[in-house]
Image: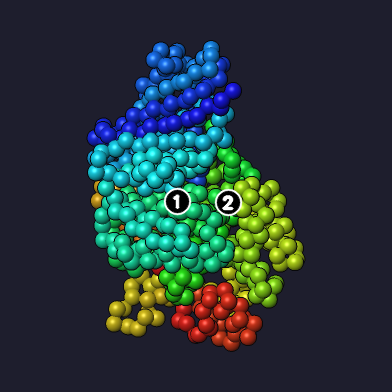
Amino acid sequence: MPSPTFHFTVDCREPGYHVYHMTLAISDLPPGRHTLTLPVWTPGAYEVQDFARHVFDMTVHQSNQPLECYHLKKNQWGFDTFEESTITVRYQVFAFELGVDTSHLDQSHAYFNGAQLFLLTDQYKDYSYDVTIMAPPTWHVSTGLDRINGDPWRYQASNYDVLIDSPVEVGTHRQIFFDVDQKPHELAVWGHGNEDVDRLAADIKAIVEAQRDLFGALPYQHYTFILHLSDRGTGGLEHLNSTTCGTARFAYQSRKKYRHVLQLISHEFFHLWNVKRIHPEMLGPFDYNQEVYTRLLWAMEGFTDYFASLTLRYANLFSVKEYLNNLADSIKAYEKLPGRLVQSLAESSFDTWIKLYKPDADSPNRTISYYLKGDLVGTCLDLEIRQRTAGQYGLDEVLRRLYARYGAHGVGFPESVYQETVEEVASSSFQEFFQDYIEGTRPISFEHFLGYVGLTVERQYKNPDPDEDHDSDNRRREEPVAWLGADVEVKDGHRLIIKHSYANGPAADRLNPADEVIAINGFQVTSEDALKNRIAQDFRIGETVDVAFFRLGELKHVPVTLAAAPPDDVSIKPVSNPSPAQIALYEKWLNASWEPVSPAHAD
Ligand SMILES: [Zn+2]
């Protein structure tokens, strides 16, 4: 009996309507009840998004005869056949959500993620899939999928997982090509801003080479970087041999903004190993119909953040000072969050579907991001392994072994294997480390771990009233300033809305999320800075102020006794008399020679 074949056609020739006209042609389908299913989530974005809500006008034909098509579940349709047959399924998908994990079709381009467009027939996940793209004649295609016979409009995926793990950019985007290890790489840029695509391509090439050096070889035939420049937020999504990154249009000239662009791209590229190939069993092959649970996202995302920065350092795209500045930034952000003492990294991973991807006003008090803390724990774990092995190994050796044993063979590992591999590399127990920092909420002693490499952490306070004529020491001070304990956001240009009240702050049970602050001690405040500066400059810790605000449209006021602000100036600096062992570990870790660098400060 011949086995069925699957051929999709994606027609995006009416982009102004934001609708993909889809056709799925199946030949040699055996008789029986068949189901067509669309994923409810896309790998890498741990959020049930119910893409089927955008699907409409589905019809099923056998030869030219219409078949009855049953809607079985929110994301599943069914039909019956009574003989081996050729089936044509037609449907339309509305796509007007610009994001790395969504699909967008407008007059300028078609961008799609397969999870939103491609129906899975029964359990034919392991069959190969052909895709033909029909687009306006001036458009072209960039994707990680393989071309069929060099045809720029026809592509093939070896199975359904690869099919929906390969986003596609179609349009008039710019294409820059370069090779690393004789393997073709493409940078596809949609949108314009203040970018310098040649410099960007050169920097991306340096990232590819630095990460290749860490693992030894590039495990793909070709790689595609899809880059969207728009006025939307920043984000990225990783795939087997491609990534999509979205950045602000004007993020390419300011050094600080460009650093974030490089970090994003480095992060997504590193994922081709860490999570796409090195992953726990639950993260592939996937169940696309429901949430999948793992307690290891700190290793998949946080450690990816860590190596994204470290390999930018190795590629000389970050100076030592920039690298340590970033680290100081993360320490500051982590230490500010009361949630670090409530939720462990393992819980944060497991609950990502309902917590990290669905934050609420109380999230800073009850949760911790596995990106933020995972990055910091990755730093500490790396330094601990380096210290225990006298510099012979680091965390990268753990990843290489997991890759060699699992990732290179396309299989996931049991979750307990992670700690076991760390212990094997360092030839000693990490039970306490994992208990404290991954399963538990013990505050991280950064001084302890950074001490291995001759660095220490200093926490200070930004001076609310610096004298600009003075030397730079005047910009920070040893003593804390007064603090209201709430973050505000500005709406409509002048309305100060409470975003969070910190559980450890003095307004925790007084100012609610969404309260609109209007005055302090009777005087109007209209900007975030004005509020912060008035509190910090005009009042002392322990003093009580009257806060006037609207709650649900009703004017109210409460007294708040100001507390001491948490440190907002964290710096990493070298110890004064480092030992030869500290210097040796530092130099190997950062691939830089020890020199008395000035303190690196968080932004
Ligand atoms: Zn990631």
SS at badge 2: loop
Left or right of 325 on screen, residue 139: left
Question: Which quadrant would residue 520 be assigned to in this image?
Answer: bottom left
Q: Is residue 512 above or below residue 183?
A: above
For the N terminus, the image quarter is top right
| Position of residue 352 measured from the top left corner of the image (x, y, whole percent) | 54, 44
- Judging depth in this view, the residue of 242 and 458 nearest the camera is 242
In the rendering, at what x and y percent does residue 544 appear? Answer: 41, 59
Of 179 and 230, nearer the camera is: 179
- Residue 87: x percent and y percent? 45, 21
Numbered circle sitting on residue 160: none
Instruction: Report the residue at 31% width, 61% height from top.
Output: 197
Q: Residue furthest right?
A: 428
Identity, as a three-letter code, of the amino acid under mark 2:
Arg
* Residue at the image position 62 percent from the left and 42 percent from the top: 282
Is 208 above or below relative to 583?
above
Residue to which mark 1 is pinned: 242
* Residue 51 showing in the rendered view: no
